[in-house]
Image (cartoon, helix red, strand yellow):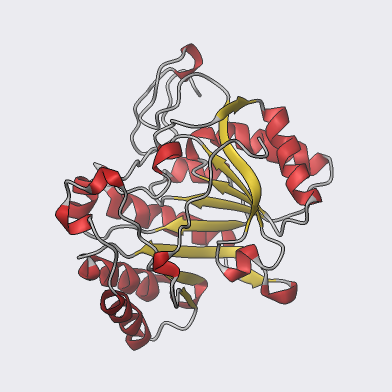
Amino acid sequence: MMQKCTLCPRNCNANRNVGEKGVCGVEGPGIVGARAALHMWEEPCISGENGSGTVFFSGCSLRCIYCQNYEIAHAKRGKRITVERLSEIFLELAGKGANNINLVTPTHYTPEIIQAVSRAKKQGLNLPIVYNCSGYEKVETLEMLDGIVDIYLTDFKYMEEEAAAKYSKAPDYPEVAKRALKEMVFQTGEPLFGEEGMMKKGVIVRHLLLPNHLRNGKKVVKYVYETYGDKVYLSLMNQYTPLPQVKHIPELNRRVTEREYEKLVDYAIELGVEHAFIQEGETAKESFIPDFGCEGI
């Protein structure tokens, strides 16, 4: 599979076995991890009180210009590990009381992740597996995860091709994300929650509102709700942080205003959305960017 990589919609055909770098930014075989720790900043039904057992992987096939995890998305941080070590990491996080195993930007490591999860389950891992991704996913790759992943925590960034092309060099993002979401919902079915409201199975669709892009945000909410209704939980986020790499993009070089975010939330309510998470208070002024110093790797 790594001789001609087509795991993501970029279909770059990089031979990662001999060290060719794919669009994801990753060179060579194996897994590169940047952080593995209990994470308290996910949605309440994912983090809970104990935290989500989150593994941040290095590299990303989408690589948005405004990425909040820019260092690892561009594969600038991380440590190379084996499938066996990744399996051990899952078990270590479970031992720390994690509510689930949360895989962040995992797409380009899908075959290795499947092996690691299967190995960990044979050794007693019984936590839900969360696939935390950009939404820019191939159906064929997602099909490999059927029976492995319990929860899809996916972005839906764009319904407007122009923005997708400008900020992520992916004008096909809206159509790709639609097909991917359909497969995710097909695999998981109706949302399922356990004790204390923790999600055991289901789909959460995140939308990070970008400054000056309220119209795009409304289109995302409308599509997801009118297509899937209560089968999917929405998570509307106001935590966008303008990082140095967007200084030359005026429309992105500021935070989202309270009014912009309120308009998106009000629009969701007007549509009839009831199953949704919103951010309140000072979240837009907080840093949700962890330290990628290879903790736990």
- Residue shown at 71%/30% (left/top)? 85
240 lies left or right of 109: left
Q: Compared with residue 106, is residue 201 higher up or lower down, i.e. above or below?
A: below
Q: Nearer the viewer, residue 296 or 263?
A: 296
Placement of 269 over or under 202, stated as above or below:
below
Image position, residue 283 (x, y; %):
44, 69
The outermost residue toward the top is 18
Measured along the vertical axis of the image, is residue 237 above or below residue 15? below
Residue 124 pos. (x, y %): 84, 46
Residue 264 visible within the image? yes
Between 267 and 151, the residue placed more toward the observer is 267
Task: Say if residue 60 shows up in the picture.
Answer: no
Q: Which of 41 and 201 is in front in this view?
A: 41
| Residue under the point 77% across and 43% down | 92
Residue at (32, 80) in percent of width and height: 262
Residue 233 percent location from the top left of the image: 49, 71
Relative depth, front residue between 285 and 89: 285
Count how many numbered circles sit on residues in the image. Answer: 0
- Give the vertical position of 148 relative to 21 (above or below): below
* Quarter the C terminus occupies: top right
Where does the image place residue 253, in percent across and percent down from the top left?
A: 22, 55
Please report the residue visible at 60 percent of the width from the left and 35 percent of the height from the top: 294
Q: In which quarter of the image is residue 209?
A: bottom left
- Please give left or right for residue 55 compared with residue 250 in the image: right
